[in-house]
Image (cartoon, rainbow, N blue to C red):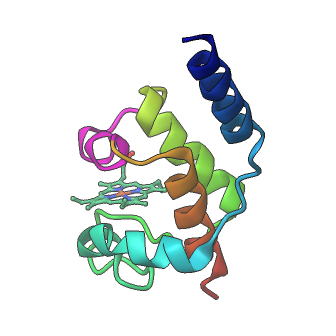
C-alpha cells in the first residue's frame, strides 16, 4: 500500500514538474473544432466572430483561461474551452500566434 502511494506521489511530482512546451502543430490539429467560427487559418468568415490569426500568444492564452474560469463571460466560448487542458490552450495559442 505504501509502495503504491510512493509511486503515485512520484508520478504526480513528475507531472507537475513537466514543462509545458507549446506545440503549434498540435494546436493546429485541435483548432479544427474552432474553424467553423474562427476560420481554418484563424481569419473569421463572419463579422460576429473575432480573428485569432497573428494574435499575441499570451493574450490568447489569457482569454481562453478567462472563458474557462468565467472571468470573461461568453456562453459559446465557455462551452468551447471547458474540455481543453492547459496544454491544449497553450498549443492553440501558439498555433494562432504563428499565423502571419
Ligand atoms: C460557435 C462559434 C465558436 C466556436 C466553435 C469557437 N469560438 Fe471562440 N469565440 C466565439 C465568439 C462569439 C467569441 C467572442 C466572445 C465575446 O464576445 O466575448 C469568441 C472569442 C474567442 C477568443 C477571444 C478573442 C479575442 O480577441 O479576445 C478566443 C481566444 C477564442 N474565441 C478561441 C477559440 C478557440 C481556441 C476555439 C476552439 C477550441 C473557439 N474559439 C471556438 C465563437 C466561437
Residue range corresponding to the magenta coloring: 72-82
Residue at coordinates 60% horizontally, 51% vertically from top-left?
Answer: 61
Residue toward you, 70 or 95 = 95
Q: Kindly tell me whether residue 53 is visible in this rendering.
A: no
- Asked where in the image residue 68 lies, by quadrant, the reply is top left
Q: Position of residue 96 (x, y in %)?
A: 56, 73
Image height check: is 4 above or below 49?
above
Residue toward you, 63 or 10 = 10
Residue at coordinates 53% horizontally, 39% vertically from top-left?
Answer: 65
Quadrant the N terminus occupies: top right
Q: Quadrant of ligand 1?
A: bottom left
**Left or right for 67, reference 89:** left
**Left or right for 98, reference 26:** right
Residue at coordinates 32% horizontally, 67% vertically from top-left?
Answer: 34
Image height check: is 56 above or below 35?
above
**Left or right for 3, reference 44:** right
Amino acid at each position: 500500500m505504501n509502495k503504491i502511494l510512493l509511486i503515485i506521489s512520484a508520478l504526480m511530482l513528475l507531472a507537475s514538474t513537466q514543462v509545458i512546451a507549446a506545440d503549434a502543430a498540435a494546436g493546429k490539429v485541435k483548432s479544427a473544432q474552432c474553424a467553423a467560427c474562427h476560420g481554418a487559418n484563424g481569419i473569421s468568415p463572419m463579422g460576429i466572430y473575432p480573428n485569432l490569426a497573428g494574435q499575441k500568444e499570451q493574450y490568447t492564452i489569457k482569454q481562453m483561461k478567462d472563458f474557462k474560469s468565467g472571468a470573461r463571460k461568453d456562453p459559446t466560448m465557455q462551452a468551447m474551452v471547458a474540455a481543453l487542458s492547459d496544454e491544449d490552450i497553450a498549443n492553440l495559442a501558439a498555433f494562432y500566434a504563428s499565423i502571419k
